[in-house]
Amino acid sequence: MLLAQIQFEQRKGDTCESENGFCPSWIGDNFERYVDPFWQHVFLTVTAVVLGFVIAFALALLAHRKRWLIPPISVTSQVLYGIPSVALFLLLLPATGRGNTTALIALVSYTLVFVFVNVSTGLDGVPEDSIDAARGMGLTENQLLWRVEVPLALPEIFAGLRIATTTTVGLAALAFFAGAGGLGEPIYRDIGFKSNVAVAGGLCVLLAAVLDLAILHAQRMLTPWRRATP
């Protein structure tokens, strides 16, 4: 089976469709075909980002205490991110089969580098005077971590989360190679038809923008001291 093979649908009726143009009427009549792929794309993106964040955040906290773990974890996450996405999907297929499992393993692996690096950078960037003041107040190491270091590292943590999320939206468009569907499937199925690409691609962009704005709003709510003052 040739992965690059593209099957074009038969379009009859009006000039716009026959010439593969941008056809608002066709979009209105066929929008329902994108609903299920869109929600599958949302599922893949959100699930991968949540799982990746939990794993990378836990690894970053562990490495913050045991500094010797930073280089091997950082290098491993960078190596995983360096594997071409389509190749990783195909490499996983014999072991995990077609479907969500294969897609999520690959997508989660691509989120690790962004979250791990930013969490580590944020924790390392906490001012020493803040740490000394907290210790002077009698805070334990765990209290210091959760009451001082993590809150002050939130801007960096959220920055990594935003990058991981928008990147995952794009990579999830290739999840159909693993049999997991998503918006990439309709894009590649009829990539020569402008209306089709505009709708499926536009939904990907919209999803990335909405998720990014949601994370940015959460950041503003959790870091009130960072809000600009008039």
Image: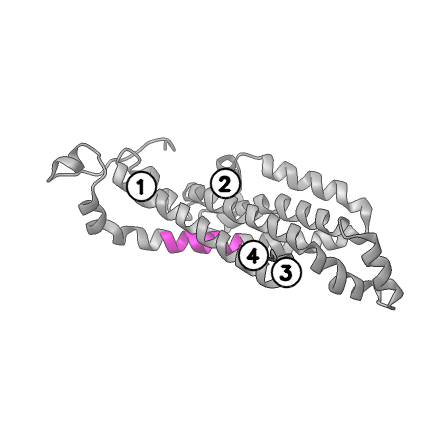
Q: Residues within 10 Å of mark 1 (few under 14, many from 20)?
A: some
**Of the residues shown, which amino acid type is indicated by label 4?**
Val
Please identify the residue farthest to the left as the structure is shown. 13
Q: Quadrant of the N terminus?
A: top left
Label placed on residue 198? 1
| Nearest-to-viewer mark from 2 and 4 | 4
Residue at x-position 84% and y-position 66%: 140
Judged from this view, the residue extending furthest toward the bottom is: 138
Taking the spot 58% from the left edge, 63% from the top edge, the residue there is 221
46 inside magenta stretch: yes
Where disc 4 sits, the SS reads helix
Q: Mainly helix, strand or loop, the magenta region?
A: helix
Tag 2 residue: 89
Q: Would residue 102 be visible to someone looking at this image? A: no
Q: At label 3, which amino acid type do we have?
A: Thr
Tell me where the magenta segment starts and ends, as one range.
38-48
Instruction: Tell me the distance, in whole angstroms, between the alpha carbons under discs 4 and 1.
Output: 28 Å
Q: How many marks?
A: 4
**Residue marked by disc 3:** 223
Q: Which mark is residue 140?
A: none
Looking at the picture, how far across and down is residue 148, in whole percent?
76, 61
Q: Quadrant of the C terminus?
A: bottom right
Q: Is residue 56 left or right of residue 195?
A: right
Mark 2 to mark 4 CA distance (whole Å): 20 Å
Q: Is residue 5 above or below residue 187?
A: above
Q: Which residue is identified by label 4? A: 50
Q: Earlier in the sequence, mark 2 or mark 3?
A: 2
* Cα distance in 3D space between marks 2 and 3: 37 Å
Which mark is in front, 4 or 3?
A: 3
> Label 1 to label 2, Cα distance in Å?
25 Å
The numbered mark, 4 or 3, whose residue comes first in the sequence reads: 4
Amino acid at the residue labelled 2: Phe
